[in-house]
Image (cartoon, helix red, strand yellow):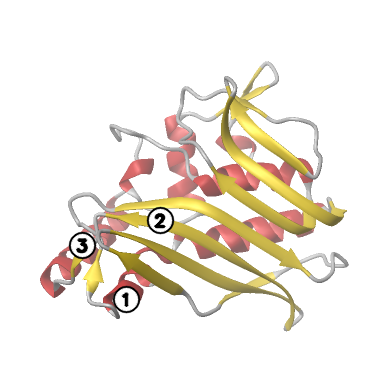
Amino acid sequence: MLSQFYQLDGDQVVISRQQGSEFAKRVADDFNPLHDVDAKKFCVPGDLLFSLVLARYGVSENMHFTFAGMVDETSKLDFPAGGEEFDITSEGKVMLSVKRDGANNQCQSLVDSLTKNYVEFSGTAFPHVIIPLMAKQQVMINPARPMVIYESMTIHLDTLDLKELELEADTPEFSYEGKRGKIILRFNLLSEGQRVGRGEKHMLVSGIRDYCQDMVDDLIDYYNNRKDTL
C-alpha cells in the first residue's frame, strides 16, 4: 500500500516531494500547502511516517509517536531494529521517536486497516474540526500563515485479536494563551461495533488571531478550491 510513496537509497528511506504530496492529497485528503510539490518549505506528512512505522514494525497494544523534526525530500531516514523505544533519524537527527509496549501484531489486514482509518481521520481535521473548535473561543488561525504542527500521537488497544478496525471521532479539545495554542483530537477504535481502543493526536498552533467570519469563509473557500483543482 505504501511502496509508491517512498524509495530506498541503500538501507535508507527517501521520500520525494511528489511522493509526499501524493500521499497527503490522495490518501490523507490533506491539502496543507506545506505538502505541495512546489512549497518553499516542503514537509513530508507526519502521517506517512506513522504509516511506514506500522508497516515495518506492526501494531502494538500501546504506541506513542513524537514528531521531532521536519522531514523533506533531502532527508535520508534510518529505521533501526524494533524495540520498546527507538528513533527514526536522518543523518543523526531525530525525526520521529517511537515508544511501544504490550503485545505486537504484524497482521497485514490489521496494519492496513489502522493505517487507512487513522490517516483519513487525521487528514480531514482541517478545516472541518479545527476551525469550528477554535471558533467556540472566538479565535482562528492566521490565514496568511496557517501554522498547525503535528506534535505527537498515542494509540491504546485493549486487544490485538483483530483483523480490521474502524475509527470514530471523540470530543476534541482546544486551549490557548496569547498567539499559541494546542489542539487534541481524540478518537475511539472499534471492531464489529465494539470499542477496542482509543487514541489522541496532539497539534500545536501558532499565529492565533481574533475570529473573523469573512476571513474564515475565504479560508474555507481557498481550501475547497485547492481540493477541486489539485
Question: In the image shown, does 178 or 199 lie closer to the viewer?
Answer: 178
Q: Kindly report which numbered mark, 1 or 2, lies closer to the viewer in this rendering.
A: 2
Dot label at residue 219: 3
Classify mark 3: helix, strand or loop.
helix
Tell me the CA gap for discs 1 and 2.
Answer: 16 Å
**Quadrant of residue 126 within the rendered picture:** bottom left
One can see residue 180 in this view: yes
Residue 167: x and y, percent? 62, 72
Dot label at residue 18: none
Residue 192: x and y, percent? 76, 80
> Mark 3 or mark 1: which comes first in sequence?
1
Type of amino acid at the residue the image marks with label 3: Leu
Classify mark 2: helix, strand or loop.
strand
Question: In the image shown, does 182 or 185 lie closer to the viewer?
Answer: 182
Q: Disc 2 marks which residue?
A: 204
Check disc 2: other Cα within 10 Å, few if <14, some if 14-19, many if 20+: some
Classify mark 1: helix, strand or loop.
helix
Does residue 43 lie above or below 220 as drawn? above
Tell me the CA gap for discs 3 and 1.
Answer: 13 Å
> Mark 1 or mark 2: which comes first in sequence?
1
Residue 115: x and y, percent? 65, 56
**Quadrant of residue 97 within the rendered picture:** top right
Tell me the CA gap for discs 2 and 3.
Answer: 19 Å
Does residue 140 lie above or below 97 as drawn? below
> Mark 2 or mark 3: which comes first in sequence?
2
Type of amino acid at the residue the image marks with label 2: Leu
Q: Disc 1 marks which residue?
A: 132
